[in-house]
Amino acid sequence: MGKSIRNTFKEHIPESYWPIFKFIDSYLIDLLYINYLFRRLLHNHRCGGFPQRDTLDIFTFNTAPDIFPGTGPVQILQKLGINFSEGRHSIYLSDPKAIERICPSITGIYPQPFGLKIIKSQQISSDGTPYYTSSRLAAASNAITMRAVGSVLEKVAISNLLNMYNVAPRVFDLVRIKSRQDAYWALVVQPVEGKMVTGERGVIFVKKLTEVLRKAGIKTLGISNHKDFRPPDFRNNIISDKNGTYYVDIQNFVFFDCQHRRHLLQKIEHLEEKHRTPAVSNSDDVTAAEKRKNRRKQSDRYWKELDIFLAENRVSFEKAYVLNIGCRSGDLITHALRRMSSWCVGICDEQKALFLTEWLYYQGHTRFDLMPISNTENLRKHTLTGRAFDMVFYRGQGNESGFPPWLQKINFKYFVYRGRTDEKIVSISDRIKSTLGFQALDLRKLYSSRFDSSPTILCSR
């Protein structure tokens, strides 16, 4: 059952002809990957490509002094007696003590527990992160296959999108681990410590995975009957633990359909349109693309002014733990992450939380959680709330007379309120003082544009 085409040929071709068969086999594989590469270029042209590393939030952590001193990760891990599992393209560590031994500064930022997947490839792709495969490490890889398979950044986005359907582990972050002589890229991942899934259970899971891939606009490289998706063992790529069943090798998945992404953006914009002022939302004489462009300009201007505003008060997004209430389009979370926030939590309605999570994953972001308003009780149980929020951002939604009562139970340092265009500074200030019980540091008014002036207040506890 599930015999490969290559093995079938070998059963019928004399062994003396195998070298010729191997040459033809390699030639056909290269042709196949050229096809994938061409389709990838076409996809990037239609969908605008993938985010660049310099637009994302990538931390660099220093290793302990004796780690990776020019000998490579495998050798030094063996020398230190650290347990790890090794594949063709990566090295995986699951022991928290081992991870802390290698990179002490990485602990305390991410949800616990987490695993560390060190990427072997050092060949950098066009988006600024390594290719997932490397022609220097695997004989089967070359310039064509590397580009067809894609970058580590793309695999991060794909794994997180599949995690929304609980069929792949979540990636908490893509980081660089730097020693005195070397630097390696690594994934901070959800640990999956369980049993390999085989046989009929694996067949059922692959059917589910195939349907999820179709919904998300993701396809597999290679033939549909590839050994990675074939019983009985599926190349040990399917693992089940107490949290679910996961496909753990993301190498074979690539983006090929941008229609799903376009529909997702339209859904987000439709929800956002409900909250816009008439001056912006009723512009019938401009196209949807022009509206989107104008809103982007307004948004970019506001965030630049906000950065200046916060800097004048000695407040920064860098390494901050941020809570965003009323996250609307997700712009605040995107901006905070690009300014190197350590983690962002957003509170919005359930449908928007789902859409925005998916959209932020498509953009390559990782260090965030979005929670529906109905689940705010879980905020205090959030895996990172052992530390106080550095900043809470609150967006005025409507005719609210106060703030939600659960907000008073949250520990935070700074509170930033962005009001509606029709709100008065005095009324906002009085509401903050009476409800939250602290004074405003600054009552400065910021203007995001001449169409959308928004009063913004910074307060401190």
Image (spheres, rainbow, N blue to C red):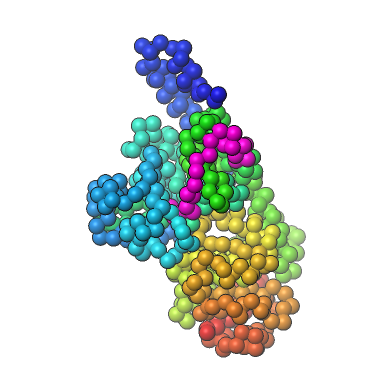
Where does residue 355 sit, x and y in percent of width and height?
65, 56
- Identify whether 95 is placed above or below 458: above
Stretch in magenta: 186-210
Where does residue 47 sit, x and y in percent of width and height?
58, 46
Answer with left or right where residue 104 lies relative to residue 429. Answer: left
Query: Can residue 298 be spotted in the picture?
Result: no
Answer with left or right where residue 461 lies relative to residue 372. Answer: left
Residue at 26%, 52% in the rendered image: 80
Residue at 44%, 38% in the rendered image: 147
The image quadrant that residue 102 belongs to is bottom left
Residue at 61%, 49% in the rendered image: 165
Foreground residue among 102 and 35? 102
Quadrant of the frame with the N terminus: top right
The image quadrant that residue 359 belongs to is bottom right
Where does residue 161 sit, x and y in percent of width and height?
57, 50
The image quadrant that residue 325 belongs to is bottom right
Residue at 47%, 49% in the rendered image: 193
Q: Is residue 190 magenta?
A: yes
- Identify whether 269 is placed above or below 221: below
